Every structure is written in C-alpha cells, then in structure tokens.
Amino acid sequence: MSVLYHGGVPDLKPGDTIEPGHSRDNYDDCPICRARREKGASAIEGTGHPEQVYCTRYRDYAALYASMYGKGDVYQVRPVGELEASIGEDFEGCYRCDRLVVVRAVERHVTLTPKRRRKVIRLMQRLEGGICLNPLPRNATPEMIERWAVREYADMRHIMREAERSIK
C-alpha cells in the first residue's frame, strides 16, 4: 500500500487518532452546514458513511479538504481496521476505514493557491470516474467565464435553498 493522506483539523500530533464524527461543518450561518449537522448522512452533500473516516493516496486531494476546513493540516496516516475503497463517492485511490492514526504532519495551515486548486481539479478530471469541478477550458474568454460564473451562482443558490428546505 502506498502512503495515505488525510486533510482536516489542524494541530494533530503523531500518534493522534482521527475518528468519525469530527466535521468541518461548523459555520453557523451556512445552511448547508446546518443541514449536515441536523440530518447527518441524509443531508444535502452529506457523506454516505459518517461512521468512517476518509484517506487518499493523493496529497493534493487531501490538501483540498484541509483547505476547506479552514487552514487545516494534511497528515500522513495509517489506517486502523479494514481499508475499503471509496467506490461511488470518490475516485480510485480514495479509501475509508474505522479510524486513522497520524504518522506525521506533511503540511500545516493549508490554503490552496489558485494554481494548486487547478492542479487538484485536473487530477480529479483525469482519474477514472473523477468529478468535474471546472468545465472551463484553459483558454476561456472573459465572456465564457462570466456565463459560467452566472450558472455556478444560480446552482449554488438552488443548493442553498434545498438545504434550507431540508432542515425545516
């Protein structure tokens, strides 16, 4: 098995255990975060396995999750329990298990630069069954970017409305 990474909560030490139930959904004014807290796995964009933790072979993909935590850290981890492929949720090279043990911190207080975010997006698009986060070509015109931004904003408004409805 190759090296595995996990991106999340900052300031863990070697030997610390990462267990399920710790969430980055801690922003009180966010309807998606509130729906996840109240509905768990059945909430919009919720994980399908809240009883397990996730890890990946891809350091940059772990860094994406660490950055979403809000200056979280990326750790090299060792699985505790059986390691299962995260089929249907992620792409090849992503796994889940009962717990993870921190081997070492490889990046602290992660904030992704636009260049590194594009690198992660290209990685995800390249991998079989990967999700497409950025449908724009590299040489997109300003008009293409504006149309894409308008559609993305409309989609996000729809997701936020659905999250609000799901907790009422």
Image (cartoon, rainbow, N blue to C red):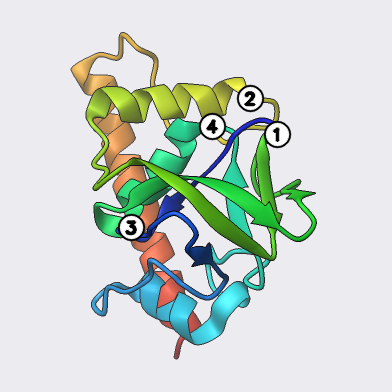
Location of residue 136 in the rendering, given as x and y in whole percent from the top left corner: 39, 22
- According to the picture, the residue beneath numbered tag 3 turns out to be 69
- According to the picture, the residue beneath numbered tag 1 turns out to be 92
**Label 3 secondary element:** helix
C-alpha separation, residue under disc 3 versus residue under disc 4: 17 Å
C-alpha separation, residue under disc 3 versus residue under disc 1: 23 Å
Q: Which quadrant of the structure image shows residue 60?
A: top left
The amino acid beneath tag 4 is Tyr
Classify mark 1: residues with Cα within 10 Å, few (<14), some (14-19) or many (20+): some
Location of residue 76 in the rendering, given as x and y in whole percent from the top left corner: 50, 42
**Label whose residue precedes the other's in the sequence (3 or 1):** 3
**Label whose residue precedes the other's in the sequence (4 or 1):** 4
Q: Residue at x 31, y 47 (%)?
A: 67
**Label whose residue precedes the other's in the sequence (2 or 4):** 4
C-alpha separation, residue under disc 2 versus residue under disc 4: 11 Å
Location of residue 19 in the rendering, given as x and y in whole percent from the top left corner: 56, 69
